[in-house]
Image: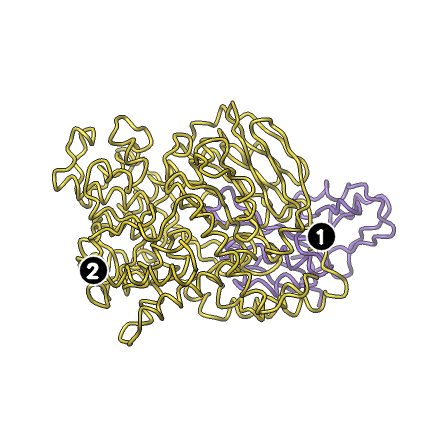
């Protein structure tokens, strides 16, 4: 197939068990792919006010023109209405997903409707089948992978996107898992799959892209240039050696790491050392792996060997780790031992929930329990205590099992749970999404509040905060920079390249990379303009669904604990949001 | 000295598949359906990866079963394919117990490593490389 043929959209209707494809050059020509095409498809397919857990909510997966063809263009964008926030849902994932979708011959996949019986989708190139998933419906994500690996073809050149038990129970922050250790983590894609009775998608590659004959020299040249930069810049060192956990210790040292539900932004030195990237790597790192077509290998796996039963019965468990989960399931929950944190990752991964949302929700529950807002009756007998791995493991299972109203509420996230039981001042969600680890200053919170996904990766406010330490700056400057960053990231996530390679894919490199595929006439200016257009399209969807920048809830806790820039003031943060609103001209 | 491609240290493999992509790029394709090398997990990603590529066997079983002698032993070791005389019967792929002969479905021809080393140029983790073939090794 030709690079320009990547415009096929596969439409799957789970209600009617029907499939069709459509050439959507109109979308791919104008919006590249990934986020740009996905938001347009979401606009087309998602009716206003749709219940995120109903058949009318579409599940969209999109790749882009660079997917599978250049180093680190390894991510797939999922777009849907989020059952957690009730608004725009967008989550990115690597593994082999992007390569498999692209080389199966699709630019995007739209899954609509809802099945009457549990199904999984087997998409082997043009051969698409609905298959009965009754036998695997109640299974953990890892087991589903094991079963489908055996019964489906495409070994080594496929992705298996599946939900765990949390997805089936529609925990609002259930995730989708690929290749055992990668996740569409945030905003509840797993719950959307659960609501559709869709357990998994197996997608395997069977095609390749023909590079235009007159462009092959250019393609090799720009490919080699990109490869050279990817492996020679700090990306390799930063993300391959220790991985993202390499920055944990320093973040804590500057007092920018939320600890015990942000009762403090700096854990004791002993804890910071226990959870540092070096410390975990030395004791538990067992393997580093990468997404398909990315030489970096940022994914870090830990192995934990432990006594299972007396009589020399040992078990060894492998789990992925990174800075986000160390924060959410380590620092936030007051863990004191890295191995306990690893046990919690395993517990969360087994059921298939977003680690950040789980950690933040349980951290709120622990503080609320300590303050007497919730009691043992609510918790079904569990005594929420910082650092208690047994209790948190049981709580994770109970969030999925939902034995009573309390756990049903926890399964809807901290915004909802705190609206029922109180303690909103320390319920750390922004725009309904549980916060990432950063308590670094005003920029990270403007990011959390205004970002289209309420993800730290929307505009990297945490990064800006840290760059501004010791410098004079204005709120205007912060808002301007964040907006510009978020707009530009729309291009990266439309191509789709991994944000870890953002320094490699400069506008100049991108235009050359596209040109070498025969996708001509893109200029740096056009890319920048498109970034703005895609960002506004996402915000317009949010406003359509009721998002209001003037009515954002800001938990008081963030003003009570100093950041590396000192105490944050609510007036200043509100002013920044008002400025943001002015700049985008709506909301 | 004649060389072949070899897995030097599979323990270092991160499963990025850059070798597979590099192989198909030689013929102007983005993907791996023209590739003579594969990376597979060794039974679950946590166990690491294995590289599947022609080992340039001595007395190669694949060449022995070729009915038209399109696949022949290369001087000094390994095999060489004459695509013009290949009838696409697939016996060679069946004879290779390493699974290192892949299939070009578009052209109905086997895909066999020609030991050019292009894939190794893109392996930044030093997993694969060209090694000299020694008779009797």
Q: Is residue B50 left or right of residue A333?
A: right
Protein image colouring: by chain
| Residue A22: mark | none
Mark 1 against mark 2, which lies toward the viewer? 2
- Colour-to-chain, purple: B
Q: Is residue A230 above or below residue A5?
A: below
Question: Mark 1: which secondary structure?
Answer: loop
Q: Nearer the viewer, residue A4 or A298?
A: A4
Q: Chain of mark 2?
A: A
Q: Is residue A154 above or below residue A587?
A: above
Q: Is residue A422 left or right of residue A521?
A: left
Q: Nearer the viewer, residue A550 or A9?
A: A550
The residue pinned by badge 1 equals B34
Q: Chain of mark 1?
A: B
Q: Is residue A540 above or below residue A506?
A: above
The residue pinned by badge 2 equals A266
Q: Mark 1: give few (<14), some (14-19) or many (20+) Cα within 10 Å.
A: many
Inter-mark Cα distance, 1 to 2 = 53 Å
- Colour-to-chain, yellow: A
- Give the x, y percent position of residue A429: 29, 48
- Give the x, y percent position of residue A418: 23, 40
Q: Is residue B83 left or right of residue B130?
A: right
Q: Nearer the viewer, residue A105 or A475?
A: A475
Identify the residue at horizontal 64%, vertical 48% (top origin). A103
Q: Mark 2: give few (<14), some (14-19) or many (20+) Cα within 10 Å.
A: many
Question: In the rendered structure, are the residues bearing label 1 and label 2 in contact, judged by CB atoms less than 8 Å apart?
Answer: no
Q: Quadrant of residue A86?
A: top left
- Give the x, y percent position of residue A361: 27, 42
Question: Mark 2: which secondary structure?
Answer: loop
Q: Quadrant of residue A402?
A: top left
- Give the x, y percent position of residue A192: 45, 36
């Amino acid at each position: 197939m030709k690079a320009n043929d990547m415009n096929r959209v596969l439409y799957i209707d789970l209600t009617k068990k029907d499939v069709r494809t459509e050439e959507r050059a109109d979308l791919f020509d104008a919006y590249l792919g990934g986020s740009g095409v996905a938001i347009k498809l979401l606009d087309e397919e998602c009716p206003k006010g749709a219940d995120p857990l109903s058949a009318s909510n579409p599940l969209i997966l999109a790749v882009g023109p660079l997917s599978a063809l250049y180093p680190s263009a390894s991510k797939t964008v999922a777009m849907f209405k989020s059952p957690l926030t009730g608004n725009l849902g967008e989550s990115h994932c690597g593994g082999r997903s992007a390569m498999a979708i692209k080389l199966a011959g699709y630019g995007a996949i739209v899954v609509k409707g809802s099945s009457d019986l549990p199904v999984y989708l087997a998409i082997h190139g043009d051969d698409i089948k609905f298959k009965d998933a009754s036998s695997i419906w109640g299974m953990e994500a890892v087991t589903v992978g094991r079963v489908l690996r055996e019964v489906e073809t495409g070994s080594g050149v496929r992705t298996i996107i599946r939900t765990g038990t949390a997805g089936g129970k529609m925990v609002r922050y259930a995730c989708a898992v690929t290749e055992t250790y990668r996740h569409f983590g945030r905003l509840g894609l797993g719950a959307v799959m659960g609501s559709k009775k869709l357990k998994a998608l197996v997608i395997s590659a069977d095609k390749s892209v023909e590079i235009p004959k007159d462009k092959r020299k250019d393609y090799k040249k720009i490919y080699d240039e990109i490869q050279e930069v990817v492996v020679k810049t700090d990306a390799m060192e930063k993300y391959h050696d220790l991985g993202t956990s390499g920055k944990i210790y320093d973040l804590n040292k500057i007092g920018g790491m939320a600890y015990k539900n942000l009762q403090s932004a700096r854990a004791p030195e002993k804890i910071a050392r226990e959870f540092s990237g070096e410390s975990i790597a030395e004791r538990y790192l067992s393997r580093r792996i990468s997404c398909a077509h990315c030489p970096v290998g940022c994914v870090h796996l830990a192995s934990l060997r432990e006594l299972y039963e007396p009589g020399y019965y040992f078990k060894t468990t492998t789990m992925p780790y990174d800075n986000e989960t160390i924060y959410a399931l380590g620092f936030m929950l007051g863990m004191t031992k890295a191995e306990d944190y690893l046990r919690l990752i395993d517990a969360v991964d087994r059921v298939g929930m977003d680690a950040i949302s789980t950690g933040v929700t349980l951290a709120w529950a622990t503080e609320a329990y300590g303050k007497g807002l919730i009691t043992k009756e609510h918790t079904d007998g569990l005594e929420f205590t910082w650092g208690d791995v047994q209790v948190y493991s049981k709580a994770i299972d109970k969030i999925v099992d939902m034995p009573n109203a309390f756990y049903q509420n926890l399964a809807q996230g901290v915004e909802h749970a705190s609206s029922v039981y109180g303690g909103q001042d320390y319920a750390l969600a922004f725009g309904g999404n549980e916060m990432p680890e950063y308590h670094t200053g005003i920029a990270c919170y403007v990011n959390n509040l205004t970002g289209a996904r309420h993800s730290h990766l929307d505009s990297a406010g945490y990064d800006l905060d840290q760059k501004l330490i010791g410098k004079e700056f204005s709120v205007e400057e912060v808002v301007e920079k964040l907006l510009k960053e978020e707009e530009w990231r729309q291009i990266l996530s439309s191509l789709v390249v991994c944000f870890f390679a953002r320094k490699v894919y400069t506008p100049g490199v991108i235009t050359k990379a596209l040109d070498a595929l025969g996708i001509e006439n893109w200029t740096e200016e056009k890319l920048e303009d498109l970034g703005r257009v895609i960002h506004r399209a996402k915000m317009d969807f949010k406003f359509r669904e009721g998002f209001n920048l003037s009515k954002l809830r800001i938990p008081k806790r963030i003003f009570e604990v100093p950041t590396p820039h000192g105490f944050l003031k609510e007036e200043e943060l509100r002013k920044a949001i008002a400025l943001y609103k002015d700049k985008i001209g709506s909301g | 000295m004649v060389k072949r491609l070899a897995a030097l240290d599979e323990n270092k493999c991160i499963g990025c598949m850059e070798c597979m992509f590099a192989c198909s790029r030689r013929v102007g394709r983005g993907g791996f359906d023209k590739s003579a090398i594969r990376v597979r997990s060794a039974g679950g990603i946590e166990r690491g990866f294995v590289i599947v590529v022609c080992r340039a066997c001595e007395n190669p079983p694949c060449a022995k079963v070729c009915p038209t002698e399109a696949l022949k032993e290369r001087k000094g070791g390994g095999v060489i394919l004459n695509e013009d005389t290949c009838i696409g019967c697939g016996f060679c792929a069946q004879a290779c117990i390493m699974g290192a002969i892949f299939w070009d479905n578009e052209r109905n021809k086997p895909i066999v490593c020609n030991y050019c080393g292009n894939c190794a140029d893109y392996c930044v983790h030093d997993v694969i490389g060209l090694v000299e073939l020694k008779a009797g090794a």
